[in-house]
Every structure is written in C-alpha cells, then in structure tokens.
C-alpha cells in the first residue's frame, strides 16, 4: 500500500512530503522514521492509474488555486467546537488528485473520440467542465471523514507517549543501577549489588536485623513457629551485664551477648534445649563424642546458620 | 560473601516438621536459579510493579470479565484489566478487588458474602498475574516478590494477599507499605512516612527498626473519600449535573489542589445530555482539604509518643508518598497546619506512585537468597 505523508526532516527541520510504502500505516511510519523523517500526517493514497503522471502543470495550478482559496484559522477553537464529533473536512490532497483524474480522463476521452476534429477544443472544454461539475456535486469526492478515532495526530501522540514511557523505563533502570552502586562499599569496579553485601558497619548490621525481622514476620504469617524465648533470655541477660558489654568493642559486645544467650539457654525452664544446642554448636564446638544423631539431622540448619 | 550477623542469629528459628529450613537439596538455589525479583504495590485504585530488570508498570486496579459471548467476541478475550476494563465497563462484570488497601471481604466486618469474597480473591489473583506478565519475566526465571500492604492490615488481610500471591509468585514477602517507602529512600530512622492511597492514608514513623503497631496509624480518609466528598459538593451546587464518582476521580487527578493560588477550574459535566461548563474550583479545594486535618492529627500523635529528644527531628522529616502526594500544594498545606504543633518540614517523595514498589524491590534485592528459599 502506498501512503501519502507530510513531515519534517529530523536533522534539518525542513518540511517534506511524499509517498511511503508499507503493508500497514505502522510499517510506513517505521520506514519514515528510519529515513530520519518525523511524520506529521499519513494517509492512504493508492497508486494512480498509468498515464496520470503527465498532469504536473495542472497539479501546480490546482495547488495555487487551493492556496489562494484557503485561509488560516485558530485550530484550538475549531478542535473545541468539534471535540468528540465526526466531521468531514475538505481534503486538499484528495481534491488535487480527483481533479487531476477527472481532467485527465475527460481529455483522454475527448482525444479518443473520432468527432474531436469537428467539435474542436470547445467540445473538450465542455466535457471537462461537465466532469468537474460532476465531481463537485458530491462532497464525498472532496472531503475525508475525520473523527476522534481516525485522527492521525492522535496516533502520533500515542507514538510519542510510548516513546516517553520507554525512555522513563530506561531512566528508572539507570536510577536503580545508580542507587545500587551508591549503596555499595566495594572499592573496585564491577557494578553494584544488594546492600547487605556492604562492609560490616553498624548500619549494615541494623539493616540485616531489619531483614531478619521481616523474614520472621513472614514466617509467622505462614504459621511457622519461631522460638523467641532464647532471644528474650539473651536480651535479659545482656541487660544485666550491660555496663560491662558497653565497654567492649562492637564485635566483642556481640560475642558477649551470644555467650550469655548460650548460658541463659541452658536454664531448666527452656522448653527444647536439644534444638538450641544443635543450633549454637557451630559457635561453641562440643567434643566429638557429644555428637548425636539429632545434631546430624540438623546439619543443614547449622550450615545455613554458618552461612549467615 | 555473606556478612556475619550475630545479633540477628537465626538460631532462634525453630524448625517445624514438614517445613524444611533449607531447600530439598540443602543448596541455596537463589544464586543458581535465575530469579526475577519484583517490588509490588497492590493499591485500591492503582497497582504498581517494578522488576529488577528495570521494567515497571502502573495499572488501575480493575478487572473485567466478559459478560457474554458477544462481549467476549468484542473484547477478543475473557478478562481485561486496568483502564481497558474501566472503559469497557458496560460490556464486562467489573471488579475492583481491593478496598482500603486489602482484598475486599478479608476485613473483619463480614459485610461481604462468601461468593463475593471468592470473586474478589480470583480477581486479585488475576490482577497480580497480569501485572507480573506486564514486566515480562523469562520462562525459566523463578519469581520472588515483596508486596506492600497498608500498615494496619490485619493478619487475615495479609494472609489473603499471601495466599493469592503464592499462586502467582514462587516466593512472597508481605511488608508494610510506608516501611517500603522509607526503605527505598534509605531513611530508616527519624522519618515519618505518610502514604496517601485511595483506600487508606497510612502514617508510619521509622526509628531504625521494623515499625510496630504503635508506630503506625491508618485512616480511611484517603483518595476515595475525597472523590466522594467532591461528588457531594458538586451535586449540592449543581443538582442537575450528571456526575459519577469516576468523573470526580478524574477531576481530582487532573486539577486536585489544596492551595489558594490556583486558576479557576472549569470542567465539562453533562446536564440532561448536554456537556456544560461547571466551575468547581471551591468544591475541589474543599474536597481535597479533608485529607489535611487527619494527617496533622496523626503526625501530632506519632510525634507526641516519640522519644522527646528526637521529636524535633521527626517533625522536620515528614515524607509524603502515594497518589495523594501528587495533590498540588498538599505538602505546603500540611506544613502550615503543623504550625500548631510546633512546625515541621514536609517533602514529597520522588515518584510518589512508584515509591512503594521501588522500596519493595530494594527490599527484595537486599533479602538474602536463603530467606527466599525458605519461604517457597
């Protein structure tokens, strides 16, 4: 299918019009875009029948007539007035091509007519006048229907909108990548990563405990029990020994708390000491003889704990 | 390499029979499987999704099911979503599955029948599946997602969302929305996040830990309440106007304002079928204004119950997010209203519509692979 287009050359800003070929309007638009043309309007214009190409002087005469007969008006007012309605507009391209076709066919008819010699040019003129008056009798020969759905401009706006969305997506991707890089503490190159892989600062620990808390909350939502008693015991003990712990470095303080958690865990009130022992053994290794079948069963859990 | 974290020792998690702590192979598959991490903000009016590949989408939280063979033929599908569903509402059974930030019927009031609840659950699941499809995950990718829910959602609400999400995603975590906003901004301490959605306005103060119930306040005076108020005010002034609450929502989103310095807002509303210009400047301002008083009251309560040494810092670190954050002049108006409680500073988060989903994605990225595996 051939399409008539009007547009602007992207690099120079110069107005341009002509024909583009494609199976669908999108293909034609794509082709124009690849040729560096930003399309303003596009409409179907099938190939004209052979022989009509010789009407160039007539085309320019028509163009001139149309130019002098038209006047510019404020488009916004017009758009407001006809918003949401289907309207017929005089189509300059259509008029030009139809008039050319009519004149051309009238002339060719007259030329082929054997009586042309007798009638002379006056006969030809009559025939052309008749054909043109027939053309102007039906408005549909000169106008094209424009509705909100068929508005080419709307199609263009949609294309721009989709382009903006794509650009936004790319920007979001970049922002995300930059924010990940910003939150990293790696000194070398190689991009970013989750913030938990940053260096061991107090903020990192805080964040990890937040992640752990969220994880626990989600376990609870799934009905999975979490043994919080050990935690409470450890905290209570840590408070008693608080002043001592405060004097230590951060790392030491953590070890101290852990030690106390272990001590508190051994209190007879603990509901399930075997599990606790199984979990904490990696930090405080027991003699080999103390290995039990239950501990072996929980090796997976130990491995997971060690990984953290 | 993982960082050692003895403070948050996992030793306190008690294994339960039938719930393996590790995946079957005892190997953390989070690194070997191709995982697509997603941040999701399931909202009453709009839902957003952000993927680790940078794709993101916001759609209106509507699901439409073709009513009959004719509508199915016209729509060329059985189910349509978002704006498309809203535009074709006459041809479909339109469902808005979320209400006040949670799935309709999962609140405790019991005002919804079992059939409706089932329908809402199905619609919410379809909506979530559609959102996930929009970010085009690969066929061989496992999907891990963090979903934001209103701060005061009950366990029942969260479980309902969890249930539908587990049918769509391989592993899911549910997190409070204001928390995800704060997390995304990397402001986890001394900040007060106000998430103004369609169903709820959530206030949450952050102080370096996961917020508890005392740190959160939720009001149902939010976007939908503004639409309703606007409808009432316009109908009171122009009784002949043919107006729907969806039109009010559009007016609010287009012209919503809480400051005086705004041009006249004139909209076209049909009167007996004829589009007629209506001046709604005062009504719009008055309707949007209803958000301010509860927010200021919420700020006052959260500040008053905070450690006095940090109250000043909290008041000067108020962040607005959600669709309500887009209302023109709201931050300034809240700042002005805060003068009675000692003043403060209110800022609007970058990209209010995506802030929750962005934070949820950041949380998903930071979450260790082992956690994801255990929740599968």
Image (spheres, rainbow, N blue to C red):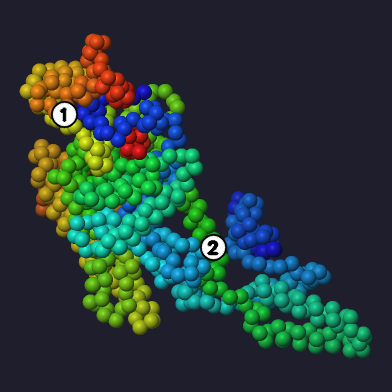
Q: Which quarter of the rendering shows the N terminus of chain B? A: top left
Instruction: Look at 26% across and 80% down and name the residue there.
Output: B239
How many neighbours does mark 2 have within 10 angstroms: few (below 14), some (14-19), or many (20 or more)?
Answer: some
Q: Nearer the viewer, residue B367 or A151?
A: B367
Give residue A186's quadrant in the image.
top left
Q: Circle 2 — which element?
A: helix
Give the camera-side residue of B315 and B15.
B15
Q: Residue at x 71, y 73 (%)?
A: A97
- Which mark is first along the chain, 1 or 2? 2
Numbered disc in front, either 2 or 1 = 1
Horizontal side of residue A194 vs A152, given as left or right: left
**Quarter occupied by residue A132:** bottom right
How far across and how far down the image is residue B204, in percent? 20, 46
Q: Residue furthest left?
A: A240
Estimate the spatial distance between the alpha carbons at disc 2 and disc 1, rounded to whole Å: 63 Å
Task: Classify mark 1: helix, strand or loop.
Answer: helix
The residue under label 2 is A155
Coordinates of residue A94 in the picture (x, y in percent): 67, 74
Q: In this view of the protein, can residue B343 be seen by the observer? A: no
The quadrant holding residue B267 is bottom left
Q: Quadrant of the C terminus of chain B?
A: top left
Compared with B303, A39 (above or below) is below
The residue under the point 18% across, 47% down is B216
Residue A116: numbered disc: none
For residue B55, say whether it is visible: yes
x and y percentages locating residue A270 in the rendered image: 12, 26
Q: Chain of mark 1?
A: A
Please report the residue visible at 27 percent of the width from the left and 19 percent of the height from the top: A293
Circle 1 crowding by C-alpha within 10 Å: few under 14, some 14–19, many from 20: many
> Which residue is disc 1 drawn over?
A231
């Amino acid at each position: 299918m051939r399409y008539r287009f009007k547009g602007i050359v992207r690099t120079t800003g110069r107005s341009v019009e002509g024909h583009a070929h494609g199976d669908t309007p999108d293909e034609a638009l794509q082709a124009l875009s690849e040729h560096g043309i930003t399309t303003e309007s596009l409409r179907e214009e099938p190939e004209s029948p052979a022989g009509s190409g010789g009407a160039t002087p007539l085309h320019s005469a028509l163009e001139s007539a149309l130019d002098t007969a038209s006047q510019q008006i404020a488009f916004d007012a017009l758009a407001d007035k006809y918003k949401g309605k289907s309207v017929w507009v005089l189509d300059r391209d259509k008029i030009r091509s139809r008039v050319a076709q009519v004149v051309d066919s009238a002339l060719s008819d007259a030329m082929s007519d054997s009586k042309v010699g007798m009638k002379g040019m006056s006969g030809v003129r009559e025939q052309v006048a008749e054909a043109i008056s027939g053309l102007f009798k039906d408005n549909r020969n000169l106008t094209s229907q424009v509705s909100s759905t068929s508005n080419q401009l709307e199609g263009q706006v949609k294309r721009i909108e989709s382009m903006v969305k794509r650009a936004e997506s790319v920007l979001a991707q970049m922002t995300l990548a930059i924010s990940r890089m910003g939150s990293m503490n790696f000194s070398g190159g190689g991009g970013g990563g989750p913030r938990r892989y940053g260096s061991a600062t107090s903020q990192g620990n805080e964040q990890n405990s937040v992640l752990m808390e969220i994880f626990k909350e989600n376990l609870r939502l799934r009905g999975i029990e979490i043994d919080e008693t050990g935690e409470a015991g450890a905290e209570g003990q840590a408070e008693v020994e608080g002043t001592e712990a405060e004097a230590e470095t951060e790392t030491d303080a953590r070890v101290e708390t852990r030690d106390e958690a272990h001590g508190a865990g051994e209190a007879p009130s603990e509901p399930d000491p075997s599990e606790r022992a199984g979990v904490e053994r990696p930090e405080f290794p027991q003699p080999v003889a103390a290995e039990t079948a239950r501990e072996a069963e929980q090796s997976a859990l130990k491995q997971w704990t060690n990984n953290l | 390499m993982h960082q050692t974290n003895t403070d948050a020792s996992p030793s306190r998690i008690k294994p339960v029979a039938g719930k393996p702590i590790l995946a079957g192979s005892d190997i953390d598959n989070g690194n070997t499987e191709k995982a697509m991490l997603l941040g999701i903000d399931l909202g009453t009016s709009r839902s957003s999704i952000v993927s680790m590949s940078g794709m993101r989408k916001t759609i209106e939280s509507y699901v439409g099911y073709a009513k009959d063979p004719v509508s199915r033929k016209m729509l060329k599908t059985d189910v349509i979503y978002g704006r498309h569903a809203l535009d074709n509402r006459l041809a479909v059974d339109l469902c808005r599955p979320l209400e006040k930030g949670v799935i309709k019927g999962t609140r405790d009031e019991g005002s919804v029948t079992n059939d409706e609840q089932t329908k809402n659950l199905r619609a919410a699941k379809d909506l979530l599946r559609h959102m996930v499809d929009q970010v085009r995950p690969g066929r061989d990718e496992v999907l891990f997602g963090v979903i934001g829910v209103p701060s005061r959602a009950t366990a029942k609400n969260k479980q309902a969302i969890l249930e539908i999400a587990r049918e769509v995603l391989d592993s899911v975590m549910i997190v409070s929305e204001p928390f995800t906003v704060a997390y995304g901004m990397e402001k986890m301490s001394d900040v007060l996040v106000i998430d103004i959605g369609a169903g709820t306005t959530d206030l949450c103060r952050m102080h370096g830990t996961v917020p508890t119930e005392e740190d959160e306040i939720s009001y149902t005076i939010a976007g939908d309440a503004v639409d309703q108020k606007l409808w009432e005010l316009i109908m009171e002034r122009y009784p002949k106007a043919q107006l729907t609450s969806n039109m009010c929502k559009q007016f609010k989103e287009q012209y919503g304002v809480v400051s005086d310095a705004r041009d006249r807002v004139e909209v076209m509303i049909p009167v007996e079928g004829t589009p007629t210009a209506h001046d709604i400047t005062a009504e719009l301002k008055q309707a949007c204004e209803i958000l301010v008083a509860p927010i200021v009251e919420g700020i006052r309560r959260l500040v008053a119950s905070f450690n006095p040494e940090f109250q000043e810092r909290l008041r000067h670190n108020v962040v607005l997010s959600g669709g309500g954050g887009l209302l023109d002049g709201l931050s300034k108006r809240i700042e002005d209203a805060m003068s009675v409680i000692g003043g403060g500073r209110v800022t609007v988060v970058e990209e209010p519509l995506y802030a929750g989903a962005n934070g949820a994605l950041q949380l998903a990225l930071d979450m260790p692979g082992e956690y994801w595996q255990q929740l599968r």
